[in-house]
Image (cartoon, coloured by chain):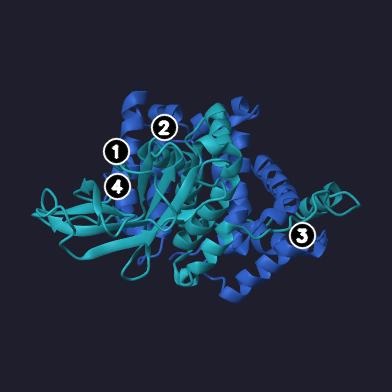
Amino acid sequence: MSADERDRLASEYVLGLLDAEEMRRCEERLARDAGLAVQVELWRARLAELDATAAPVTPDPALWPRIEAALGPVAPATPRRVARPSRLATWWQSLSLWRFYGLAASAALVLLAIGTAQLARQAAQAPVLVAVLLSDQNQPAAVVNAFRDGRTELLALSALKAPEGKSLQVWTLWDRERGPVSVGLLEAMRNVELSVEGLPRPAAAQLYEVTLEPAGGSPTGRPTGPILMKGNASPTETGI
Amino acid sequence: MTTLLPALEAAAEDDLAEALRSCARGDRAGLQLLYDRLAPKMTGVALRMLRRRDLADEVVHDTFLRIWEKADSFDAARGRPASWAFAILRNTALNALRGEGRMELVGDFEAIEPASEEADAETLVMALSEASALRRCLDRLEPARRRAILLAYMRGLTHGELAGRLGVPLGTAKAWIRRSLLTLRECMT
């Protein structure tokens, strides 16, 4: 499923357009697809205001006693899960500014972390590396997921567009000797597969960044314009 | 960033988060606090989707049982407690709409005048805060397409039901929705 298809599925799921079978399949997928979970959370945040417009209705006084009776006499059967530290948690803590992000962004980031951890069970489809690209305002602007087979995708979290006569160029850097290598050219931020054919498999701490370049890309083959967003890849629990 | 219930202060959100932690420990007082705070608005949302009071009550009933069962999976770092709870409510209501009870609902749906739905959708937009990004972005959509998005969310209509309601072929309805959602995403990101 491409990043755009994922966003579409997330939006249609949150809006409530899916039929019963599509809903079931989407929920199955949600449990193992971090990208989808991020998009669902973002869509929920975008549309939540609509629920706030509903006129409150006093519940039937008989309803609470019915709920309470249905709870049963004992505490819930599922014990509280104990969080265990992971490499991912370390990665998470390193994003010291995350607390200041808006709800959607922080929810997306945490979901990404949690979703990615869940993906460990589905190694084939799980990214092995995740980089959150932050803007100069320290806002999450994009996510890069790298998969075991080398496939690498960029998920846009901002709608940044290049001005007339400019392009957005995506770079990765894993070796200072070799320098940054272009892996994508966009007119506006969108979900896209990065062109990583022929490059070494991505490694931990590998840098991903987006710079503003002349239309058609940097004439020198190296970044020449300002860095719009950047982030380093961190291994997920799936492992490289 | 918008909040689900703008009147709630951060402290009230903390109360809800604490109430969810109480539920996870098996303390019913936590669930009762959540019910007292959220059930009226939830009943309103469920009624808007299901159009029948008895079904709306059933959905709210099932929602609180699910909140009780799933409270241990709530993580305050992942989002606000009210958003988390309303996601459960919406899913429960959608399952009720898509489930066995759906056939008997169809009659009720058809009885609603299209004109009243149109008015409902516009009222919904007006109910959003003037400062709301969602409102500004919805205003960019052509009225029929805006109505499609709002009806889908408010009523839980499927693509097929929307096509019927808008009087356009299914493919057209899907394309409208897809295009409108892209516009919304770009406008709100």
Q: Residue at x 61, y 40 (%)?
A: A121
Residue A171: percent from left, percent from top: 26, 53
> Which residue is label 4 attached to?
A190
Specify the subunit that label 4 lies on.
Answer: A
Tell me, for residue A209, which label it has, or none.
none
> Which residue is label 1 attached to?
A198
Tell me, for residue B162, which label it has, or none.
2
Q: Nearer the viewer, residue B160 or B120?
A: B160
Numbered disc in front, either 3 or 2: 3
Specify the subunit that label 3 lies on.
Answer: B
> Is label 3 on the same chain as label 2?
yes
> Which residue is label 3 attached to?
B23
Check the rendered structure and report the hue given to chain A: cyan
In the figure, is residue B1 to the left or right of A81? left
The CA distance from mark 1 to mark 4 is 23 Å
The CA distance from mark 1 to mark 3 is 53 Å
Q: Residues within 10 Å of mark 2 (few under 14, many from 20)?
A: many
Disc 3 or 2, which lies upstream in sequence? 3
Q: Amino acid at mark 4?
A: Arg
Q: Give the structural element (helix, strand or loop) at label 1.
A: loop
Question: Which residue of the protein is positioned furthest toward the front in this rendering?
Answer: A177
